[in-house]
């Protein structure tokens, strides 16, 4: 996630790494990671994960993903182009134990559709783990916040602060919200949500 050679990844990991580690400790079995980026999450997967299918639309990131998987000892089952419908359909419904979204729904035009697709991939009892930026609440700081968004978006692969992400998580049918925490992340002082969902039978 870079512009002109600059990447936000180290800054984001310093701010969000602890929360991602705690969240992704809940991943198990077969994992689909949507928008796998440079593979920053691989270091947080535990021995409970048997393999990862990484969906990443940018093929230039695939060599880095493969390298990070090797360094983290993660079995990378498949690398798929997330934007190709044929590849998305290649994941059978009801076949996945965990679906992971971290800083990926924020760049997808229709998060509700993506969450529904993730729901279909999951086995009954499977988990959906999410860590995403959400919309700024009304505030006198709104002009400053909008400036943050304008700077953030091109440096983060089009990721924006979207209020519809939170509502999409809260209204997804067929799941139980096990945990949902809203917090502010530094140094960008922006609102995020970390959530764990459980697919009902």
Image (spheres, rainbow, N blue to C red):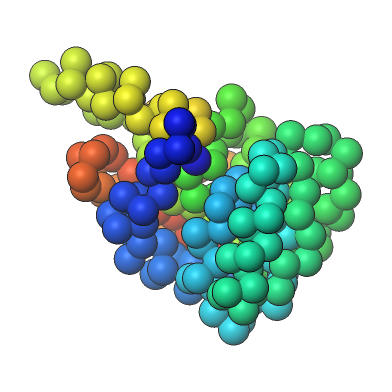
Residue positioned 79% across, 60% down in the render: 78
In the picture as drawn, the residue positioned furthest to the front comes out as 5
Instruction: Using residue 4 as the reference point, say whether residue 71 is left or right of it.
Output: right
- Disc count in the image? 0
Viewer-proximal residue among 184 and 7? 7
Name the image quarter holding the C terminus.
bottom right
Q: Is residue 24 above or below residue 157?
A: below
- Say which residue appears at 71% left-offset and 43% top-offset: 59
Q: Position of residue 95 (x, y in %)?
A: 80, 63
Residue 163 horizontal side relative to residue 91, left or right: left
> Which residue is painted at 25% across and 20% down in the image?
147
**Where, by quadrant of the figure, is residue 89 drawn?**
top right
Furthest-top residue in view? Answer: 143
Spot occupied by residue 2 in the image (x, y as percentages of width and height): 47, 37
Q: Front-most of 162 and 46? A: 46
**Residue visible at 63% across and 65% down in the picture:** 67
* Residue 91 drawn at (x, y percent): 83, 53
Any part of residue 195 in sight: yes
Depicted 27 relative to depicted 87: above or below: below
| Residue 176 in view | no
Image side of residue 126 versus residue 132, left or right: right
Q: Is residue 103 left or right of residue 54?
A: left
The single residue placed furthest to the left in the displayed view is 140
Residue 132: x %, y % from top left: 43, 44
Would you identify the image quadrant in which residue 112 lies?
top right
């Amino acid at each position: 996630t870079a512009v002109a050679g600059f990447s936000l990844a180290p800054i984001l990991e310093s701010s969000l790494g602890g929360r991602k580690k705690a969240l992704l400790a809940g991943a198990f079995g077969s994992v689909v990671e949507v928008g796998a980026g440079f593979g920053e999450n691989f270091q947080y997967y535990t021995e409970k994960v048997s393999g990862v299918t990484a969906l990443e639309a940018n093929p230039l990131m695939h060599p880095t993903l493969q390298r990070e998987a090797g360094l983290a000892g993660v079995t990378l089952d498949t690398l798929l182009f997330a934007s190709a419908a044929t590849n998305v359909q290649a994941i059978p419904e009801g076949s996945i134990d965990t679906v992971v979204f971290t800083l990926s729904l924020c760049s997808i035009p229709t998060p509700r559709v993506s969450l529904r697709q993730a729901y279909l991939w999951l086995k009954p009892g499977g988990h959906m783990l999410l860590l995403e930026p959400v919309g700024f609440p009304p505030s006198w700081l709104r002009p400053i916040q909008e400036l943050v968004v304008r700077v953030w978006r091109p440096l983060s692969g089009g990721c924006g602060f979207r209020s519809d992400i939170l509502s999409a998580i809260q209204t997804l049918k067929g799941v139980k919200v096990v945990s949902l925490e809203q917090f502010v992340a530094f140094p960008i002082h922006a609102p995020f949500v970390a959530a764990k969902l459980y697919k009902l039978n």
